[in-house]
Image (cartoon, helix red, strand yellow):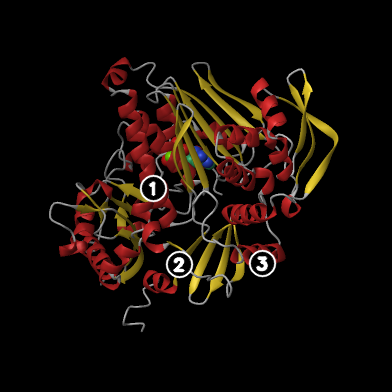
Amino acid sequence: MTRIRRLETETRRKIAAGEVVTRPSSVVRELVENSLDADASRVSVAVEGDGTERIWVRDDGHGMDSDDAALAVERHTTSKLSGPADVERVSTLGFRGEALPSIVAVASLELTTNDGGPRGTRVRVSDDGIETAPAGRARGTTVQVADLFYNRPARRKHLGSAKAEFARVSKLLSRYALCHPDVGFSLSHDGRETFSTPGTGWTDALLGVYDRTVAGQCTHFSFAAGSADGTETGVEGVLCYPSVTRATRDHVHVAVNGRPLADESLRRAVVAGYGSLLPSNRAPIAVVSITVPPDAVDHNVHPAKAAVAFRDEGVADRVERAVADALSTADLRRSGEVAMDLDATLEPVEGESRLADASVIGGFRDLYLLCAAGDELLVVDQHAAHERVNYERLRAAVGSVPSQAVDPPATLSVTPAEAALVESRGDELRALGYDASPFGGGTIRVSAVPAPLGRTAAPASLREVLATLDRGGERPADARDDLLKEMACHPSLKAGDALSAAAAERLLDRLGACDQPYACPHGRPTVLSIGEETLVRGFERGNTRFG
Ligand code: ADP
Ligand code: MG
């Protein structure tokens, strides 16, 4: 990490000066760029109200020691330029040493930072000067900006509603999140998280910023081209299929050397790469990240760094070609279908037993068993399977449901109507494995509970049983069946956690032995299947090029 230094006059003169902070979103932009320059892997932003009240940006980057922290808030101090020549080859997002002092000029700023040492530093800037003190903090930096434009009433009047200003922040941060997919971002407004990305690549970033439909229909690409003068242009990113489009080019996200830009010529180049694939008047959703050598691009042409100038004319052409190439190799029509449409790809299993030849491959999230069965992948809902097995076993065992003594007996408080049921339906309850009797004073005593399949029902489950008996009214058979379903689904009878491999196989066997293995007692599916065909299509192995 380079130390912060004061820029000499010559360097300062070369830097495009201008007003850096014009609204809350410009504060966020500058602070987030500092976090990215500090190699953060997580950046969290929180905004209160329209952003003039308070903004926090927290990162886990390399932080600063106490000397640098105090210097950082002064004018023309930066760790990113070592001399005037560097202005022509900037590889960081910041370089002017202006952001923090510009914020200090219009707001109150508090910076807490730690460069990995035993303790961190807090810097507060007020009219009285710069005050530093030791502070506890893990490695990284938090900057809190409050009372933005307290001394600039005209600026403040110029701002939109809280909703509009926050929308700008949200749009801005989502651009950074999309263009830096390996960094996790999160944004919250008035304490509520509005989006987050995990920092695990393009698809997950699209999922965080957009939704499943968008993230499920995209293709990644990566392209490198040299030009006559030897400069390398790298173009990579993610392109959504033409089956998902938007009305404007706003969702074409372009970044140059990590800086998202609202550059119309680059956006047009991306859209041109889609060519005739797009319906007329529609624009794609795409993230295109362009990398050129630092000296091939001038970031210093716009005070807010919203535009760049390329020293090489061919960049837009190369972007268009990269996009066109990527789309011509993706089989778009088919890929559109393969987007994880749960209805189409997961079929509930029914009919004759397909479980006899199934074997458990593993589990997913302690909720699902994954099983191989011929050319199908079966997904078994562990809870639903247990419910079906419990239900059929209970049904078979009525009259001799294994019972477990409750010692000492449990006392339940009940309504007079429930107490009356315990008395009048005692035989039915015993057939189900309960032993209960009125105890007086609005209570009953439960001295035995059902213990089917090695699991013991909780005494309180009797309340639900009574409620079901009550509902059953005149038709005892239905009431009993409802009761069995209720009991089969009672949480205390369900597997809640990880099954051992042997237990998983056993569950699958038992499910296979059921009269109706493919639905839980309430009629929901227990097993879904994904045919090999779906995977073939999904992985585009049907593509003739690969046979
Ligand atoms: P610039 O980014 O143009 O250098 P700034 O005023 O934004 O200027 O920041 C001044 C200096 O403070 C930076 O050069 C950097 O060394 C340090 N700095 C600012 N923010 C952070 C941060 N989040 N993590 C680590 N260092 C930071
Ligand atoms: Mg900066």
Identify the element where label 3 is drawn: helix
**Residue found 56% across the figure and 36% down from its top:** 472
Residue 45 placement (x, y as % from top left): 47, 35
Q: CA distance from mark 1 to mark 3?
A: 70 Å
Residue type, mark 1 in image: Pro
Residue 239 placement (x, y as % from top left): 31, 59
Residue 361 placement (x, y as % from top left): 60, 69
Q: CA distance from mark 1 to mark 2?
A: 61 Å
**Residue found 54% across the figure and 48% down from its top:** 2
Side (left or right) of 511 relative to 34: right
Residue type, mark 2 in image: Ile
Crowdedness near tag 2: few (<14), some (14–19) or many (≥20) residues, C-alpha within 10 Å: some
For discs 1 and 3, the disc positioned in front in the rendered view:
3
Residue under label 1, please give it. Answer: 84
Identify the element where label 1 is drawn: helix
Mark with earlier residue (1, 3) = 1
Q: Nearer the viewer, residue 403 or 339?
A: 403
Choose top left, top right, bottom left or bottom right for residue 365.
bottom right
